[in-house]
Amino acid sequence: MKNFVELDLLLHSQLRLAVMSLLISVKEADFGYLQEATNSTNGNLSVQITKLKDAEYIEVKKTFENNYPKTTCKITKKGMKAFEKYVSDIKQYLTPKN
Amino acid sequence: MEEKNITEQESLAIIQQMIAKSKQQLIDRSKFFFLWGFAVLICAVAQYVMLKMNVLKSDEVWLAMPIIAIIHIYIAAKEQKRVKIISHNTIAIGSLWMGLGVAFFALAFLSHRSYVNTGTALDVLPLLILFYGIGTFVTGRILQFKPLIFGGLACFLLCILVTYIDGPEQLLILALSVVVSYIIPGIILKKEFNNQQNN
């Protein structure tokens, strides 16, 4: 009988996982792109990004461009490690049980 | 998409879907190939014509290159503001061309120093074509874009061929090298970008 590890609850959520999956493959991405790619609302995405930022999984940079605010997100080393661990943990659930 | 619990299968599907989405982000890279391709083509052909007409100081046409570099930096800075995503490929390709850009100017300086020290300018044409080949070949490999890979391979052959040619005709080989490695792949890149944008 296999002992299943507990999944990282911060990542085991639809929108946060989608954001992390997008950020893992790029150097950085802006808020508009993340919203478009995940098809999420402005408010909800902001909340989830703040949770990931508070956990130090991502870095959030706020700048101004042509007088408009621009938010850029980037995955951190800690976030990368957490994501890799999450993927490896999830594999346990997906492989046939002995 | 919203904040909700998911199954392990759904997790995997989200990861796959999002990683695939991040790869779909397209960038029109053709403008830099056109900028440098046409600049080098025009300068090479212009110098060839000037040499044939015995015009003195024909090599001064190449003083246009720093101006092209300034135009490149201006366009790149404008683009940088518009991009929504910076991929690892963009960083790799940018770093490669930045390194080659420095190498091109270093080569021009070395040639000048050689002229000052020995009275003979260093023959930089084979090296220039070799550098074009490295840039386009590696970019083609990163983007998995065959026209650039073939353009790069063609430059590797042309940089050898040019050493068997004497006189102003060498400039025509240089012109040919940018046509095969910059201009033709640039046209195909542009076409592909437009097609994908329309779909």
Image: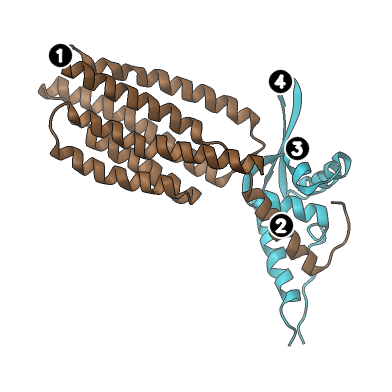
Checking the image for residue A66, the label placed there is 4
Total marks placed:
4
Question: In the structure shown, which secondary structural element does the residue marked by tag 3 occupy?
Answer: helix
The picture quadrant where one finds residue B58 is top left
In this picture, is B67 found above or below B128? above
Question: In the structure shown, which secondary structural element does the residue marked by tag 2 occupy?
Answer: helix
Q: Is residue B170 left or right of residue B13?
A: left
Q: Residue at x 78, y 77 (%)?
A: A4
For label 3, the crowd category at 10 Å Cα-Cα, with few meaning under 14, some 14 to 19 and many 20 or more, is some
Amino acid type at circle 4 is Asn
The picture quadrant where one finds residue B53 is top left
Closer to the eye: label 1 or 3: 1
- Residue A65 percent coordinates (x, y): 70, 24
Cα gap from disc 1 to disc 4, whole angstroms: 52 Å
Q: Is residue B156 left or right of residue A98?
A: left
**On the image, numbered disc 2 is attached to which residue?**
B17
**On the image, numbered disc 3 is attached to which residue?**
A32
Seen from the viewer's position, the closer of residues B114 and B158 is B158
Q: Chain of mark 2?
A: B
Asked if badge 3 and badge 2 are on a common chain, one would say no
Cα gap from disc 2 to disc 1, whole angstroms: 63 Å
Q: Residue at x 44, y 33 (%)?
A: B33
- Residue B19 percent coordinates (x, y): 66, 55
Checking the image for residue B112, the label placed there is none
Q: Which chain is represented by brown in the image?
A: B
Cα gap from disc 1 to disc 3, whole angstroms: 58 Å
Closer to the eye: label 1 or 4: 1
